[in-house]
Image (spheres, rainbow, N blue to C red):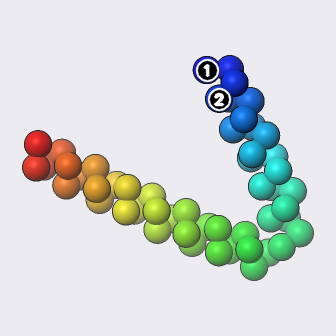
């Protein structure tokens, strides 16, 4: 659990530093992330209703 938290923290810190210098990349990541969250939510909803 601790290793997972450390990796997540490292990835978040690295992503923040990279995306701070590239605003267009930050917008793209935000859009893709939002679309993926909607898709995952839809999949979970369908799975719940089907099961």
Vertical arrangement, residue 31 with respect to residue 50, above or below: below
Estimate the spatial distance between the alpha carbons at disc 1 and disc 2, rounded to whole Å.
5 Å
Relative horizontal placement of residue 1, taking residue 26 as reference (left or right): left
Q: In which quadrant of the rendered image does the C terminus lie?
A: top left
Q: Residues within 10 Å of mark 2 (few under 14, many from 20)?
A: few
Relative horizontal placement of residue 28, taking residue 46 as reference (left or right): right
Residue 3 sits in which quadrant? top right
Q: Which residue is mark 2?
A: 4
| SS for dot 1 | loop
Relative horizontal placement of residue 41, taking residue 49 as reference (left or right): right
Instruction: Give me the residue at 74% from left, 74% from top.
Output: 25
Instruction: Give me the residue at 28% from left, 50% from top.
Output: 44
Q: Position of residue 18 (x, y in %)?
A: 84, 61
Residue 43 sits in which quadrant? bottom left
Q: Are marks 1 and 2 in contact (CB under 8 Å)?
A: yes
Relative horizontal placement of residue 15, taking residue 5 as reference (left or right): right
Q: Which residue is mark 1?
A: 1
């Amino acid at each position: 659990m601790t290793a997972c938290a450390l990796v997540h923290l490292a990835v978040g810190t690295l992503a923040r530093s990279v995306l701070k210098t590239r605003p267009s990349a930050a917008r793209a990541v935000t859009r893709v992330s939002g679309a993926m969250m909607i898709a995952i939510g839809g999949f979970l909803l369908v799975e719940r209703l089907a099961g």
